[in-house]
Image (spheres, coloured by chain):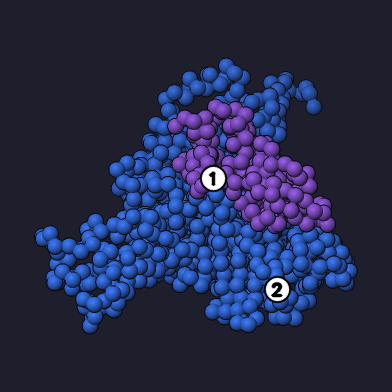
Chain colours: A blue, B purple
Amino acid sequence: MATESPAKTQGMGAAIKRKEDRRFLLGKGSYTDDITLPNQSYAVFVRSMYAHAKINSVDTAAARAAQGVLAVFTGTDVAADGLGGIPCGWLVKGKDGSNMVEPPHPALAQGVVRHVGDPIAMVIATSKAAARAAAGLVEIDYEPLPAVGRLEDATAPGAPLVWQEAGGNVCFDWHLGDAANTDAAFAGAAHIVKIDVTNNRVAPNAMEPRAANGHYDAANDHYTLYTTSQNPHLIRLLMAAFTLHVPEHKLRVIAPDVGGGFGSKIFHYAEELLVAWASRRVGRPVKWTSERSEAFATDAHGRDHMSHAELALDATGKFLGLRVKTLANMGAYLSTFAPAVPTYLYATLLSGPYDLPAIYAEVKAIFTHTVAVDAYRGAGRPEATYLLERLVDKAARQLGMDRVELRRKNLIRPEQFPYQTQVALQYDIGDYHATLDLALAANDRAGYERRRAESAARGKLRGFGISTYIEACGIAPSALVGALGARAGLYEAATVRVHPTGSVTVFTGTHSHGQGHETTFAQIIAEKLGVSTDAVEIVHGDTDRIPFGMGTYGSRSAAVGGSAIVKALDKIVDKGKKIAAHLLEASPGDVEFVDGQYRVVGTDRAKAFGEVAFAAYVPHNYPIDTVEPGLEESAFYDPKNFTFPGGTHLVEVEVDPETGVVEVVDVAIADDVGVIINPMIVDGQAHGGLAQGIGQALYEEVRYDAEGQLTNGTYMDYCMPRAADLPSFKVGNHVTACTHNPLGIKGVGEVGAIGVPPAVINAVLDALHPLGVTDISMPASPEKVWRAIQAAKQAAHQATQPAGKGA
Amino acid sequence: MATITLTVNQQTHTIDCPPTTLLVEALREHLRLTGTHVGCDTSQCGACTVEVDGKSVKACTMLAAEAEGAQVTTIEGLAKGGELHPMQAAFREHHGLQCGFCTPGMIMSANDLCRRVPEPSEHEIRHWLEGNLCRCTGYHNIVKAVRAGATAMRGGK
C-alpha cells in the first residue's frame, strides 16, 4: 500500500473514493460511441488487405447505389478538397545533421497502400449495417508489390523499400552520448558483457475501441468532433493547422469519457479528420467506431526494437561504460510522436538508476510495411529498462556476483543528486537504495530458498527476478523539447473558477481516461482552499470549455497539469487576500490564508473563503479601485525539468518444465513516484502498469509475417492478460519529493509497465538456469520456454557424448 | 424487418429491427441503454455482459429475437432508487474501476458468480472472470471488489 494519511479525508494524501465512479457504475458514462446525434449517419472504411500494393482503380459505383448509402469517398476526393496529410509532431535529425525522412501520410490512400489496414475508401450510410454491406461492394484493383513486414528483414540488402526516398528503409540514423569516452572506458575494462535483445511489438488495447463522430453545422459554419482522444486540444491544433484547415474557433473537439488510452489515443488519426470533413460533404453527422480487429490493424502499436548492448565493468563490478545499437520500427508512416520514442524517450534513459560514467547509443529508425509504431505506456523507457536490466543480470552471472549486490554497488547514491547522466538528463532527486530495500523486505528475500524448495517438491522450477529502474516523465520543458525537435510546447494550462457561494470549477487541459483526475485534482483544490472535494468539479476534454491544454500522456497530468492548477490557485489566494484585507480593514501583508480562512495574523479576526468569494461577486464593500470583481484565474505551467520516478520491481515465477508454462506467483514492487495525492489511485495505477508489463513479458506480441500480413489481429489470437493469469500485487512507495514542481509530484502512470518486464524475464531465466537456458525473448510463451528447455537438454546431452559420436 | 418485444430492466419495449440484430445492438442502438459496451468482435472481452433470465450472457453472442420473452437486466437496472447495488458499491469502495469501460460487464458477470458461489475464493473469482478483459486495473482491485461484493450480497458487511 502507498503511504496513507489516515486522518485525512479531503486533501493531499487522502485515499478518498473516486468522484467519477458513480456514473460509470450506473452505466451512465458517455463514451464517444454512446453519443448518437440527430440525423446520425455511419462510416465504414474499406482498408487494404495487402501490406504493399499499387491501386490501379477503385470502383465505387455498386456501393454508391446500395440501399442507405449517402456517399463513398476515396483518395481522389480528399485530394480534390485539399485535405492535408497526417503530420508528424517531432523532427529528429540524424548523426550528420540531416532531417529524418518524413514521407507523406494521406488520409485516404493516393494510389499506393503501405500496410494492411491502410484506408482506401470511406462508405457513409444511414445505418452501420448498410455502410458495412456497401463497403463490401467497393471493388479495388490491387497490384501487389514486394513488402517487408519485419524489422529484422527491413535493413537487409535488397529489402523492398517502403519509401524510395528512404534508402535501406532508414528514417533516421541518430546517436547520443560520447563515443570516444565510451571506447576509452571499454579499453580499460576488466570485463565486457554483451547481449542481444528484442523488445516485442505489442498493441495498446484500450478496452474502448477508437471512435469519432463529426458534425458540421452549416448554419454557423462550425465543426464539432467527438473523439476518443487523450488530448483534444492537440487534435484541434493539428486539424486546424495541418489536416482540415479550419481555424480553431470553428472547430470544437470533445473527448468525452474515454475508455483507456495507454498512448494509443494521443495521436491524430485520419478517421478524426475524415468524419469531420465528410459531415460537411453529406450534410449529416458522421460516426465511425472501430471494431477490435480494425483496431489491431490501425491503432499505433508500441515497442518493436532490436538491440545489441555491451557493458564494461572493472574487476570489482563497477560499471564503466555502456554501448548500445538499436533498430527501432517506425511502421510505414510516422505517427504523431513516433520519432521521439526511440530517441529522446529511450536513449536518454540508458543510464537507468546507475552511476554510469560513459554511454554511447546509436539508433536507426526503420520503415516497414506495418502500421505505425508510437508511444505505448512507458514509450521508450520500457525498452531502455529492459535492455539495461537484462544486461546487468547477465553481467552478474558472468562475473559470479549476486544480482542484487551488483545493482546495489552501482546505484546512484542519495548524496549524488542532482545527478548528471551521460545521456543528457539531470536527475533531481531519488533514493534507489531505499526502494531496493523496501521491495526486498516485501518480497521476503530471506525466505526465498524455502519457497524454491517447496516449488521443487511440486515439480516446479522457481525463479527470482529483479529490475531496478528509472523513468523520465512529467513531460516536458518546452524549450528543451523544442531544441530536440518537438513541434509543440509541452506545458499545461488550467483555469480555476470560484463561484459566488464558494464552490469551485476547474478547467484542466489534461484528460482523464481512467486516471481519476476528477478526484485527485479536487483533492488539490481541497488542500489549497480548504473546501470539500464535493464542492469541486473538474472539467476536461472539451476545447470550447477549457482554454487550452496539451493532454495526458507521459505521466504528466498531476506533475504538469496539477502544477498549472496550483499556479492558478496561488493567484486566487492572492486576490482573495486583497479582498479579505479590505473586509477585515487590515493590510494585505497582515493577512494569511490558513485552513480555508483569511486571518489577520496574530488576531482572531477572520473571513471564511466563501465569504471572500461572495464579496468578489457582490462587490458592495470591496476594494473596487484596485481589485477587479470576480474570482477566476488561469495559469500555464511549463515544467523546469522532467521528473524521475524510479524503484525496484521483484518477481517470482514458477515454470512447469514439462509444459513450459510460466506462472507469476509473486510481485513485490517499491516505487518512488514523488508526493502522493491519493494512495488508492496511485496503487491502482501501479497495478494496471504491472499487468501490461507482465502481459508484454509473457503473453503479448503483435505478429506480422515476412510479407507484412498481420497474423494475430483479434482477441482470439492476441493473448491479453486475464484475471487468472496474474497474481495480486504487493505495492510499496518511498517518497522523495520532486524538487522543481510545486506539489513535489513525479508521476505514476507508467512505472508498472516500465519496471516489471525485465524482472519477469530475469525470473524465468533464473528458474531455467539449472537446465542451462541462458536466453529467452519476450513473450516467454509456453512454447518458447518449452523449446528453450528442449534445446538446452539436447546441448547438455551432446556435451556429455564422447567426441566423434553422434550427429 | 422483425418486430421484437423485449423486457429489459422490468420494462417492456417493442422494437422494429432486422432479424439479424444482436441483443447488444438492440440495447445500445434501439433502447439507448449505452451502459452495455462493445469492446471486441470475437466475444472475448465481456464488456457487453448482461443478465438474461438470471444468467450472465455476452450480449454480442445472442440475437435480440432470442431474448424475446426473457427477463433482461443491464447495468442500468441494478441500482434501486438511486442506491448502488452491493456489487456496484464494492467496486467503488475498492477502486475496482478506472476508465469504466469494462466495468458494467465485470459487474454483471460478478453478480452471476456470486449467485452461483456465494462465497467465492480469489482463485474462483479470477477464473470466473476469464471472459472479461480489463486493461486498466490489473484485476487486483476487481478481485477485491468482487469478494467484498459477494459478502455484501450475502447480507454481511
The amino acid marked with disc number 1 is Ala
Residue A210, horizontal then vertical, whole percent: 64, 59
Relative vertical location of residue A466 with respect to residue A53 in this rendering, above or below: above
**In the foreground, A71 or B31:** B31
**Residue B58: mark:** none
Q: Chain of mark 1?
A: B
What crowding class fits label 1: few (fewer than 14 Cα within 10 Å), some (14-19), or many (20 or more)? some
**In the foreground, A636 or B154:** B154
> Which quadrant holds the C terminus of chain B?
top left
Q: Chain of mark 2?
A: A
**Residue A284: mark:** 2
The amino acid marked with disc number 2 is Arg
What crowding class fits label 2: few (fewer than 14 Cα within 10 Å), some (14-19), or many (20 or more)? many
**In the foreground, A39 or A20:** A39
Nearest-to-viewer mark from 2 and 1: 1
**In the foreground, A387 or A713:** A713
Q: Residue at x 59, y 36 (%)?
A: B111
Task: For residue A89, say whether it is visible.
Answer: no
Whole-angstrom CA distance, mark 2 to mark 1, is 36 Å
> Which quadrant holds the N terminus of chain B?
bottom right
The reply to whether label 2 and label 1 mark residues of one chain is no
Where disc 1 sits, the SS reads: loop
Q: How many marks?
A: 2
Query: Is A371 placed left or right of A500 in the picture?
Result: right
Q: Residue at x 35, y 63 (%)?
A: A503
Task: For residue A16, say whether it is visible.
Answer: yes
Q: Residue at x 14, y 67 (%)?
A: A590
Residue A604, horizontal then vertical, whole percent: 12, 59
Residue A100, horizontal then vertical, whole percent: 61, 68
Where disc 2 sits, the SS reads: loop
- Residue tagged by mark 1? B79
